[in-house]
Amino acid sequence: MIRALARPAVRITQRRCASTSATTPAVQLQNIESRWATLSAQEQSSVAKHLEQIQAGEWTKMTTEQKKAAYWVAFGPHGARTPLTGPGHALKVAAGTTAVVGAAGALFLWIRSKGGEKPTTMTKEWQEASNEYARANKINPISGVSSEDYKGTGFVSSSKN
């Protein structure tokens, strides 16, 4: 008889404990954008699950704060959508590009200063001789040096000697 009286009390207690442990604690959704980075992975997961449960119901009953939080968790710049570049990145790229182009220009000028004389094929006499050779052998007779009304300089590239 004592057992019969104790069973309903145990069942009520079990139901009460099960119902209180199954409910999720109230998740703070205010200012989730700034707090998201400081939340642990478990807390982030619980926030996401809580928002999924809310969205499973009628969306017209969601508060503005819940809608903002659900949108931010779904599409916010976190996880795989974290921006790859930070502030000042364009300035760093511009400075690096300028430095590399400047170094290449300095290297070019240094190599030019260490170089010897011009090759003999770059003299004006050699280039004029190349024009005469082209005319004598009728090289490019349609539009080049050997054509009938040609008025260009031919192979002469500069007037300097």
Image: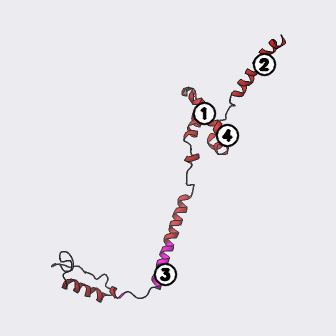
Judge whether residue 109 is colored magenta. Answer: yes
Residue type at mark 1? Leu
> Which of the two marks, 2 or 1, is nearer to us in this view?
2
Q: Which residue is tagged 1? A: 51
Confirm or deny contact between disc 1 and disc 4 (CB under 8 A): no
The answer to whether residue 30 of the structure is visible from this angle is no
Magenta stretch: give its range.
Answer: 102-119
Q: Which residue is tagged 3? A: 110
Residue type at mark 2? Val
Give how far apart the Cα atoms at labels 3 and 1 are.
65 Å
Q: Secondary structure at mark 2?
A: helix
Q: Can you tell which quarter of the image residue 135 is in?
A: bottom left
Q: Which residue is tagged 4? A: 42
Say left or right for 23 vs 4: left
Residue type at mark 3? Trp
In percent of the image, x 52 and y 62: which residue is there? 93
Horizontal and vertical percent position of residue 32: 63, 40
Label 3 Cα neighbours within 10 Å, binned few <14 / some 14-19 / many ≥20: few
